[in-house]
Image (spheres, helix red, strand yellow):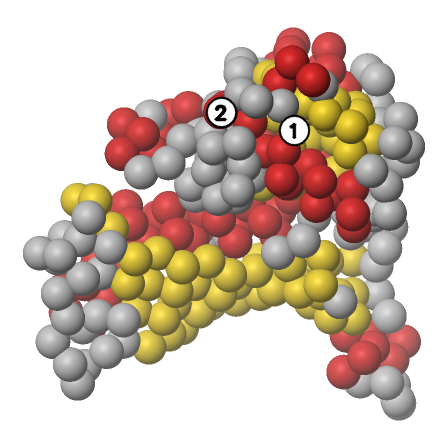
Amino acid sequence: MKYRDLTLLAIEEMFPLGLTKQRAEEDYLVFACDSSASIGEKPNDQLASPNPLTAQTALRVPLIELRAVNAEPVLAFYLVNNEMNPTGLAYQEGFQAELKRAGFPHIQVNGSTEENMVTSMSALGVVLMGKAANNEGLWIKRVVSGDRVFQLKRPRCGQAVLDEMDKLVSYQDIDLLLSRPDLVHEICPIGSKGALNEAGQVADCNQLSFKANPQGEDLAIHQDSAGPATALVVVGTDQLGSFLVDHFEEVYDLGEMV
């Protein structure tokens, strides 16, 4: 099943018969991925960035995607379109730093590099596999008509990400939102098409429509790319707005689900 940018697979679909089925019904596998190109230390990169930091920002996207639906990362794969030494080794350093930052320092990491061709531009792909409990624990399809829609954090992309790392959505922010299922019904990282687009996708996934606030429809802050998951769309009850304002800076009312 595809849900937003995630792929979900019930383990019982993989093991439909026998003793494994009883356990399999408890869990889903959840897959998220991201790619990064022309960001790094190579001569033809458009944005100069330390390679470990490039890896960190690439990995945070699928990490936040998984945590946003209450899935726990269990395995990471990197696809380095450059040589192992020095680029791949620097990426590995960044992966371990980001996994530690996210609270998952012990998950397994594996991958591949390009050793046959000389490359002049950095390129990296990341695939993350997570595990989630059954529908009671997996945060999908929880939105109802009348829910309010908010944007958490201003979107940042490119150099702004490097300049304002301390202002990006954090894993602790996600954990706080997950701790309030009574207020928060869905968490969605904002991608390259902006907050309003993500809100529309959330509505589609929940068989609803998104009604945007007219005063915000033309604002760039709600349409700009959020780069490596620097901002969120958060959907929930009428009381959600006051909770967000009490605990976060940069909170914007986008509209409602109908």
Q: Give the labeled residue for mark 1.
A: 176
Q: Residue at x 78, y 47 (%)?
A: 204
Residue 241: quadrant of the picture: top right
Q: Which of 97 and 246 is in front in this view?
A: 246
Left-right relation of 175 to 136: left
Label whose residue precedes the other's in the sequence (1 or 2): 1
Placement of 122 over or under 182, stated as above or below: below
Query: In this view of the protein, can residue 180 be seen by the observer?
Result: no
Placement of 229 over or under 255, stated as above or below: below
Q: What element carries label 1?
A: helix
Instruction: Give how far across and how far down residue 141 sits, in percent.
Output: 83, 48
Which amino acid lies under the numbered mark 2 shown in the image of this protein?
Answer: Ala
Placement of 103 over or under 256, stated as above or below: below
Instruction: Give how far across and how far down residue 54 sits, in percent.
Output: 29, 49
Instruction: Give how far across and how far down residue 219 sits, in percent.
Output: 53, 20
Q: How far apart are marks 1 and 2 (CA)?
A: 27 Å
Q: Which of 79 and 92 is in front in this view?
A: 79
Of badges 1 and 2, nearer the viewer stands 2
Which disc number belongs to residue 220?
A: 2
Q: Is mark 2 on a helix, strand or loop?
A: helix
Crowd around label 2: few <14 · some 14–19 · many ≥20 (10 Å): few
Left-right relation of 81 to 99: left
Query: In this view of the protein, can residue 205 be seen by the observer?
Result: yes
Instruction: Give how far across and how far down residue 233 sits, in percent.
Output: 64, 33
Crowd around label 1: few <14 · some 14–19 · many ≥20 (10 Å): few
